[in-house]
Amino acid sequence: MPNPKRRHSQQRSAKRRTHYKAQETTLSTDATTGLMHVRHRAHVSEGKLFYKGKLVAEKAPLKA
């Protein structure tokens, strides 16, 4: 397997890495609950699971 014969400079490595940037997560407001949440993810509000403004699951009461 080929190996580099010489060391790459720091400038060369930095030029390659300039394109990797951290991105902010996109937030949106849920129509039913009014809470901010990460887009395309289900979120919990008052023990209920919502996705795209619809109730997906409720927390079942504990049985003793």
Image (cartoon, rainbow, N blue to C red):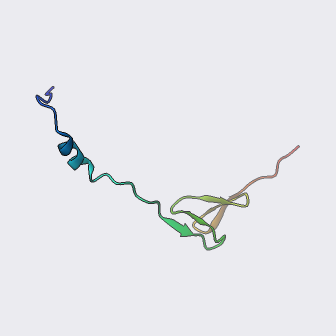
Number of numbered discs overlaid on the protein picture: 0
Between 35 and 63, the one nearer to me in the picture: 35
Q: Position of residue 57 (x, y in %)?
A: 68, 58
The spot of residue 38 in percent (x, y) is 53, 61
Residue at left offset 60%, top offset 70%: 30
Q: Quadrant of residue 2?
A: top left
Could you tell whether 12 is left or right of 21 in the image? left
User: Hey, which quadrant is residue 45 in on the image?
Assistant: bottom right
Q: Is residue 57 left or right of residue 5?
A: right
In the rendered view, tell whether residue 19 sits above or below residue 3: below
Q: Residue furthest left?
A: 5
The outermost residue toward the front is 10
Residue 10 to residue 27: above or below: above
Give the quadrant of the N terminus.
top left
In what quadrant of the picture does the C terminus appear? top right
Tell me residue 7's x, y (percent).
16, 32
Side (left or right) of 9 relative to 31: left
